[in-house]
Amino acid sequence: MSTLTDRPRPAGREEQASSGRWWALVVLALAQLMVVLDATIVNIALPTAQADLAFDDAGRQWVVTGYALAFGSLLLLGGRLSDFFGRKRMFVIGLIGFALASALGGAAQNLEVLIFARALQGAFGAALAPAALSLLSTTFTEPAERGKAFGIFGAISGAGGGIGLLLGGVLTEYVSWRWCLYVNLVIAAIAVLGAFLKLKDEPIAAHGKIDIPGAVTAIAGLVALVYGLANAETDGWTDVMTLGPIIAGLIILGLFIAIERRVAHPLLPLRVVLDRNRGGSYISVAITGAGMFGIFLFLTYYLTAILQFTPVRTGLAFLPMLGAVMLTATTAGSILTPKIGPRPLVPVGALVAAGGMLFLTQLDLNSTYAANVLPGLIIIGLGLGLVFAPTQNAATSGVTHADAGVASAMINTVQQIGGSIGTALLSSFAATAASDYLVGKEPTPLAQAQAAIESYHTVFWWSAGFFLLAAVVSAVLFRTGPLDVDPDAPPAMAH
């Protein structure tokens, strides 16, 4: 429960508390940036790391999958642990662990150490990400302030992937691929210092036991699901190593839900996900996560393979999109969400993003960045900004503080699963489109370049479809009107 009382405070103290909250937001946003950044920064460094450490493409896949497996499967447990042991404590543990894992990866002399370090990064990221979002949720309880805070946090979440591409390009090209990992030491050091100076946590209420059967089934089910989806990308959908783990994962997750309905202290109380606004935000984020993959990965391929951009230029090419995400997330997303809620904003944002993807389906071998790529990127960014800020706010709205960690973990979990599904589906669609195009044709360089264009078009159409689906789902699921206020906020603040 909140330790604030509802006695009026002297104005100076109120102002001081408010500025303290905004400093807390800076610390939390920095940590969120580090976690989101790491999903893409290493992708840029991988070809150089592969040449340096001499490993094959299967090994390259595991550098990415190792992080996704650990992060995606441990998030729910990480969220619950922050509710039990204190959010600030889990936040600091997550930061320090993430930094040490990054140092290990940066110093890696072989593939095995690099994969182990990436898995460790994922595990500590799973402690860090829910703690950051739940600290944000419990720090900003007044609707207008909350809208602004989630607008900024949502902008960072949406833009982090693109910042990762740029930073990864700069570090790989001018320093070394190892600095794509070492850079986390700098970010984490600043965030840890900020956490001790600026973050305040609430006293932890006495809790029941940790739900061990729930934790085991959640982790096993999510590992199997993410592993199967990762295999789909390389082995195809009909392979036994794809279908087996996916089916097993779904069965184990079904068992997890059955356990959660019966245990006294569930890992994921079903009340958290069954609320229409929170459920709507989780599903919208999962679908949007699947669609976003089409932009970051396949547009990167287009820029590097067809337009011959260097890694740094590729990273810079995404900056206008990030500016657009930040613009709508911090303006319309943060100002309108407290007044009208997520229902009009998220469907409109997803539709705008779908329009931007459709624009990109016109790309061909003679397209230019300024005329044919840039407008689509800006449109997509404007749309995504309207999706991220309200969904992250809705994901943690109206939950008691005792459930804030696990509600925050869910939004990260579904984004991770959505991204994994997007990776697997869109990669297989792209491969099929390229090989279909080449059937009966002489594999000249021109024909192969055209086949690549066909594969990108297929992915952009599917991504537009994902965004369209997100628009429909969010329009149906979200309730009309402003979000629920924080039930644990003191009466003076919960207008």
Image (spheres, helix red, strand yellow):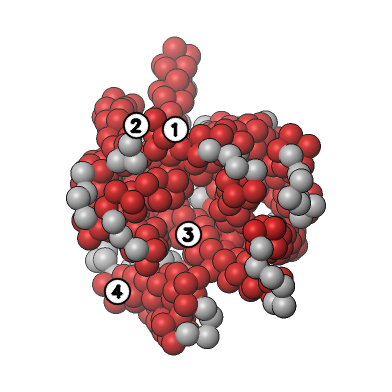
The mark that comes first in sequence, 3 or 1, is 1
- C-beta proximity under 8 Å, tags 2 and 1: yes
| Disc sitting over residue 170 in the figure | 1
The mark that comes first in sequence, 4 or 3, is 4
Kind of residue at disc 2:
Val
The mark that comes first in sequence, 1 or 4, is 1
Kind of residue at disc 3:
Gln
- C-beta proximity under 8 Å, tags 3 and 1: no
- Label 2 and label 1: CA atoms lie apart by 8 Å
Residue 268 placed where, x, y %? 41, 66
Answer with left or right where residue 453 lies relative to residue 222.
right
Residue 438 placed where, x, y %? 68, 72
What residue appears at the point 28 percent right and 37 percent down from the top-left corner?
182
Residue carrying label 3: 416
Q: Give the class, few, some or many, for how many residues have Cα within 10 Å of label 2's Cα (few <14, many ≥20).
A: few
The mark that comes first in sequence, 2 or 1, is 1
Q: Give the class, few, some or many, for how many residues have Cα within 10 Å of label 3's Cα (few <14, many ≥20).
A: many
Kind of residue at disc 1:
Val
Answer with left or right where residue 220 lies relative to residue 163.
left
Q: Quadrant of residue 10?
A: top left
- Label 4 and label 3: CA atoms lie apart by 19 Å
- Above or below, 104 against 410 in this view is above
- C-beta proximity under 8 Å, tags 4 and 2: no
Residue 176 placed where, x, y %? 33, 36
Q: Secondary structure at mark 3?
A: helix
What residue appears at the point 46 percent right and 37 percent down from the top-left corner?
169
- Above or below, 414 against 8 in this view is below
